[in-house]
Structure formats: structure tokens, C-alpha cells
Amino acid sequence: MPSPLTPADLVVLALLAERPMHGYELNQELERREAQDWAAISRPQVYYSLKKLAQGGEILRAQDAGEGSGPERVVYRVSAAGRRGLMAALGEERWAEQRPPSPFITWLALSGHAAPADRARVLARRRSYLEQELAKERRTLAAIRSEIGPMTEVGALMVDLTIRQWEVELAWLDEVAARLG
């Protein structure tokens, strides 16, 4: 029985469903799309997923890049089974029913044990971090809106949600600072 598809596997499958690519190209595309902001997938995971998906028949070799190019240059494409697996996994309701804990919320839950000066310093650092990220995401949103492509609208919606969440969190931090002093 094949092992279930992980989120990293699904990211790889989705990118290959857009067009055939080799591992190095997949990693470049993930970097271009700033995948670290929306998926937990590393460079080694891309190659692990490629191997797993090839062994499971979800992807097929489209072509080799040439002699001596190494396994990272084998071009893969999604098979019919891979498309079915991707669609089935994305149709699962579990995607809408998870609430992963934020490291900051974990810190907040434990912050009663921190020295008041440390608590104030971490809260100030969170505010600074959010302000920096908010500025970055606003630039990202402007860049996305200037692009044309099948995933442009989805990307814009994702970044817009992040911006809205961080704006709310920044306002909430004022209340946290006031109440926890």
C-alpha cells in the first residue's frame, strides 16, 4: 500500500501539473513563489517527494537533461494517477478543519513565566516583525497584481489574507501590551 501523500508531495504534484520540471527547477519555482510563506517544504523534501512520487507512479519521467546531469535534472510530469491523487487529496475537508498553533501564540501562553522586561521586549519584537512583513507582503501583492497567469488570483488572495491577518494582529498587540503591561 503506498504511503499517503504529504503536503510536500502535493506541492510538488501541483507544480508538475502546471508543467513538467526537474527538481532544481521545482526548487527555483518554489523560491520564486515564496513557498516558505505558505507551505512547509524544503529543498531536500522536493527531491524526497520526487523519488516517492516516481516510485508510486504519480509522476513519470518526461525526459532526461542529458548524460552526467545528475538525478536533479530528470524532468518529471504528472501521470493520470498523480492528477487523480492530487484532486482527491485537495477534495478532503481536513484542509478546512485544521488550526496549526503559531509559535507566537505558544510563547504568549507561556509568557506569564517570563520576566516583565523580556515580555515587553518580545512583544515589541513581534510588532517590529509584523510591520516589516506587512510592508514586504504589500510589495508582493503589488507585484502579483502586475502578473498574468492561472495562479495569479489565488496568489493575490493568499497575500491579501496574510496582510489582513497581520493588520488585525498589530491592532491586537496594542491590547496585549496594555493588559500584560
Image (tube, rainbow, N blue to C red):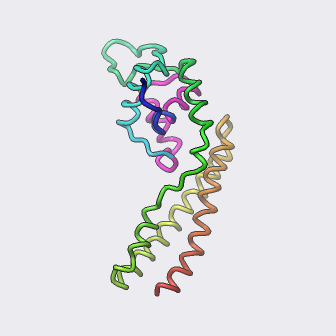
Which range of residues does the magenta coloring cover? Answer: 11-38
Q: Is residue 68 above or below residue 46?
A: above
For image coordinates 39% across by 76% down, the residue present is 111
Of residues 68 and 13, the one nearer the viewer is: 13
Picture coordinates of residue 143, whole percent (x, y): 62, 48
Q: Quadrant of residue 138?
A: bottom right
Is-magenta flag for residue 17? yes
Residue 118 appears left or right of 28: left
For image coordinates 47% across by 20% down, the residue present is 76
Q: Is residue 114 above or below residue 144?
A: below
For image coordinates 67% across by 45% down, the residue present is 146
Quadrant of image for the N terminus: top left
Residue 12 appears left or right of 166: left
Picture coordinates of residue 58, whole percent (x, y): 49, 22
Picture coordinates of residue 163, whole percent (x, y): 61, 60
Residue 172 appears left or right of 58: right
